[in-house]
Image: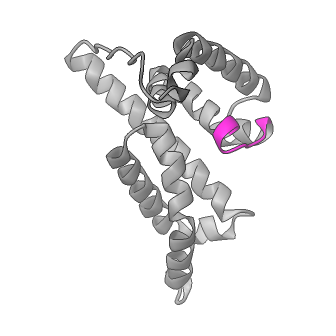
Amino acid sequence: MPPGTEHDFEAFARASQSKLYRTAYLLCGNADAARDLTQTTLAKLFQHWRKASAADSPDAYAKTVLTRTFLAERRRRLRDLLAHRHVDRAPVPAYAELRVTLLAALAELPPRARAMVVLRYWDDLSVGTVAELLRCSEGTVKSQCSRALARLRTQLGEAHIYATEN
């Protein structure tokens, strides 16, 4: 690595770590897994920092690496689980706070649909940007998000009523 670029990476990592962690937490639904995903993303960025720093937007490049790493790990983990045991899903608690209920409902979505919903509606990225990040068409993003939101509405039902009562 050329001199000075290591310091550039350190400055970038400090500035963007919390944003990457928030997105990772929404994707993973678990603080430990989000920390691991953030660190893995930063390690990959460090390995390819020359290319990442030359990108139009290093933040977008980092978000792309984070999302693709999440999806690759989920595919790998799913293959391992399917090869070794049957997966039982925990029921969504009926009277949980809205945040917990929403995270549980997000966890029920397939990884790619979850990534699309988080990137599109939480990170407020455009359809075109999400399509570019996930290497698919804009129509795919629109249809997958529509299906995922319908599924979330079905799963959440009247959950928002219980979240505001105290």
Which sits in the foreground, 107 or 91? 91
Q: Is residue 96 above or below residue 91?
A: below
Q: Give the colouring mode of the picture.
A: one colour
Q: Residue at x 72, y 35 (%)?
A: 131
Q: Residue at x 46, y 20 (%)?
A: 108
- Please indicate whether residue 122 sits to the left or right of residue 106 in the image: right
- Residue 46 colored magenta? no
Count the marks: how many? Answer: 0
Q: Is residue 54 above or below residue 94?
A: below
**Toward which corner of the image does residue 85 lie, by quadrant?**
top left
Which sits in the foreground, 6 or 86? 86
**Toward which corner of the image does residue 76 lie, by quadrant?**
top left
Q: Is residue 122 above or below residue 82?
A: below
The x and y percentages for residue 122 are 64, 40
**Toward which corner of the image does residue 40 lie, by quadrant?**
bottom left
Residue at the outermost bottom position: 3
Q: Residue at x 42, y 15 (%)?
A: 94
- Please indicate whether residue 77 sits to the left or right of residue 113 in the image: left
Tell me which segment is drawn in magenta: 120-127
Residue at the outermost front position: 166
The x and y percentages for residue 32 are 32, 48
The x and y percentages for residue 87 are 28, 15
Which sits in the foreground, 73 or 151? 151
Q: Residue at x 66, y 45 (%)?
A: 123
The x and y percentages for residue 78 are 35, 25
- Please indicate whether residue 140 sits to the left or right of residue 52 in the image: right
